[in-house]
């Protein structure tokens, strides 16, 4: 009987140690999905009027370059008339 209690104590101790080893900070988790790859960087352009940087797909093309808004595009084109 004493032998069974010692074996049972070792089994419980082993189970607790195994769980604490799995749940330690920085341990890889088997059940979680791998992290997704970060999105690809987007090309940034600067506004010809104010210098604000914005993604290429949000830039407005104009006569003097690209602009962050319609107001900046029209202000730039008024200040720099075509030659």
Image (cartoon, rainbow, N blue to C red):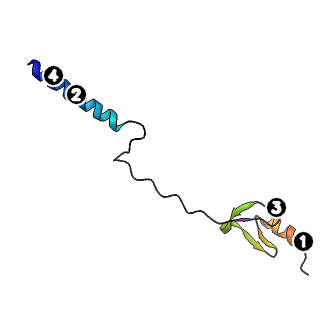
Counting residues from the start of the chain, the first of labels 4 and 1 encountered is 4
Q: Give the crowd class for mark 3: few <14, some 14-19, many >=20 residues within 10 Å.
A: few
Which quarter of the rendering shows the C terminus? bottom right
Q: Position of residue 53 (x, y in %)?
A: 73, 61
Residue visible at 39% across and 52% down in the picture: 33
Q: For the magenta stretch, what is the residue range?
A: 40-50
- Pointer 3 or 4: first along the chain: 4
Q: Earlier in the sequence, mark 3 or mark 1?
A: 3
The residue tagged 2 is: 12
Horizontal and vertical percent position of residue 80: 90, 73
Which residue is located at x 11 percent, y 23 percent?
Answer: 4
Query: How far apart are labels 2 and 1 at the CA level?
Result: 81 Å
Q: Which of pointers 4 and 2 lies earlier in the amino acid sequence? A: 4
Name the residue at the bottom extreme: 83
- Sequence-wise, the earlier of marks 2 and 1 is 2
Total marks shown come to 4
């Amino acid at each position: 009987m004493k032998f069974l209690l010692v074996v049972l104590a070792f089994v419980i101790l082993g189970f607790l140690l195994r769980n604490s080893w799995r749940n330690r900070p920085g341990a890889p988790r088997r059940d979680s999905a791998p992290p997704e790859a970060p999105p690809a960087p987007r090309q940034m352009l600067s506004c010809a009027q104010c210098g604000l940087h914005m993604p290429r797909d949000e830039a407005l093309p104009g006569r003097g370059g690209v602009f962050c808004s319609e107001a900046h595009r029209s202000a730039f084109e008024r200040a720099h008339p075509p030659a």
